[in-house]
Image (cartoon, rainbow, N blue to C red):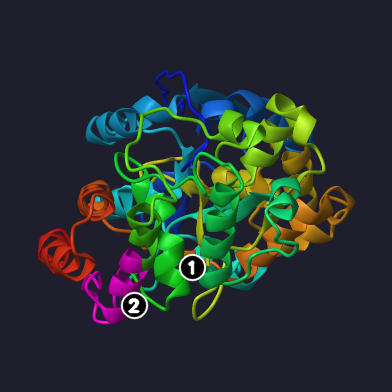
Amino acid sequence: MTRTKSVSVAATVVVTALALTSCGSSGGERVAADKKQTLTVWAMGEEGTRLKAVTDEFTKQHPNITVKVTPVGWDVVHQKLVSAIAAKKTPDMAQMGSTMMGEFIALDALEPVDTKTFKKSDFFPATWDSNVKDGTAYGVPWYADTRALYYRTDLAEKAGVDKAPTTWKDQQALAAAYQKAGAEWGTDLQPSSTGAWQSWVQYLYSAGGELIGKDGKPALDSPAAIRAFTQWASYFKKGLAKKTFTPGYDVTKDFGSGKRPMFQSGPWMVANIDDQQPQIKGKYKVVPVPADKTSTSWVGGASLVTFKNSAHKAAAEELTQYLTTPKTQAKWYEADKALPANKAAWDEPALKGGGDSLATFKTSLDTAKAIPPLEKWNEFAAAVEGALSKISQGADPAATAKTLQKTAEGLVG
């Protein structure tokens, strides 16, 4: 859940005058897929405004199903979903951000996925894993976000570096070279505030660490975690990254001017740079996150969920199938630039001819890890961000990790 957000509205399940038939599910009576009905869907941010055109195509193939899409702002969607669940007035389906899954699984609001219809092997592993709790999947991956490294190739050459950084050592050497050649900062790295965890998790995963260990407990003071904290902190300690952060800061302008010629972010930044900083077209590259033990990024994005109290689960399954087919995923990429979660979609022409940057994100998705679905993810992330804030200002990584571990253990049941 990382893309830009807005708007809201409520939705009401419409069941009037519809023939009901039992399908033997946990939701009780349901409307069969071939009956005339209205399917309500909440979708967030820009996806909410663009989804209607796609569902109109679905309706042409399923004229008995009217799809009512309600755009909901990312900033209000959490409260609206919680209120809807409490009032038992959820939509039939929704788009759900990856870090939201744990809380809504814990609320027992989501219908388990029929794994005879939807196969894990069709999707990038991490996009599926972020929806799984105790062996049961509660969402079907829709689109994926992952992180890669953006760097200015023209400024790297001027600084005496002519190859892409592939290791932590390479990355830090490039940051130092940029700064020595005149850049204000060697790299951009968010030191604190909401979202700072996104600048650190790829270091953790590349060092071989995990947020949650195999024993189900946080693993934030493991040797790998401490190594990741230490490497991340070294950019601030050496003056290669700015220690203060202004909420809402966007690196695009400073990347274009060369003040911050390197950063890690998601696929949407390609369009942002090309639109807002056209003078650097052909003067930057996107490469996989530099490796420690491995080059391992993390996966965000959104899945499609069906609510347990929906009377339209069969129709919801039909729409979910349509939205996750390779061809529909490729069309959605052309409309929204959201990376397909279905692996076969990447063989479609719209993706195969997408250039080097897109190929980099495909490589990252192949090996990326999931953010585990935690009931108290927001509190867990805030605790990590608090630790990162202290470490960026000079606190000892090992001691801070030990304190963080105790806090996190109280958040994971």
Q: Residue at x 77, y 29 (%)?
A: 278
Q: Residue at x 73, y 50 (%)?
A: 158
Residue 59 visible in image: no
Amino acid type, callout 2:
Ala
User: Where does the image place residue 370, in percent across and percent down from the top left?
Assistant: 45, 64
Between 100 and 164, the one nearer to me in the picture: 164
Q: SS for tag 2?
A: helix
- Image check: 223 left or right of 125? left
- Image check: 109 left or right of 152? left
Q: Residue at x 72, y 40 (%)?
A: 332
Reading the image, the residue beneath label 1 is: 369
**Magenta region's main secondary structure?**
loop
Alpha carbon of mark 2 to alpha carbon of mark 1: how far?
15 Å
Reading the image, the residue beneath label 2 is: 224
Query: What label sits on residue 68 in the rendered view?
Result: none
- Image check: 186 left or right of 51? left
Q: Quadrant of residue 173?
A: bottom right
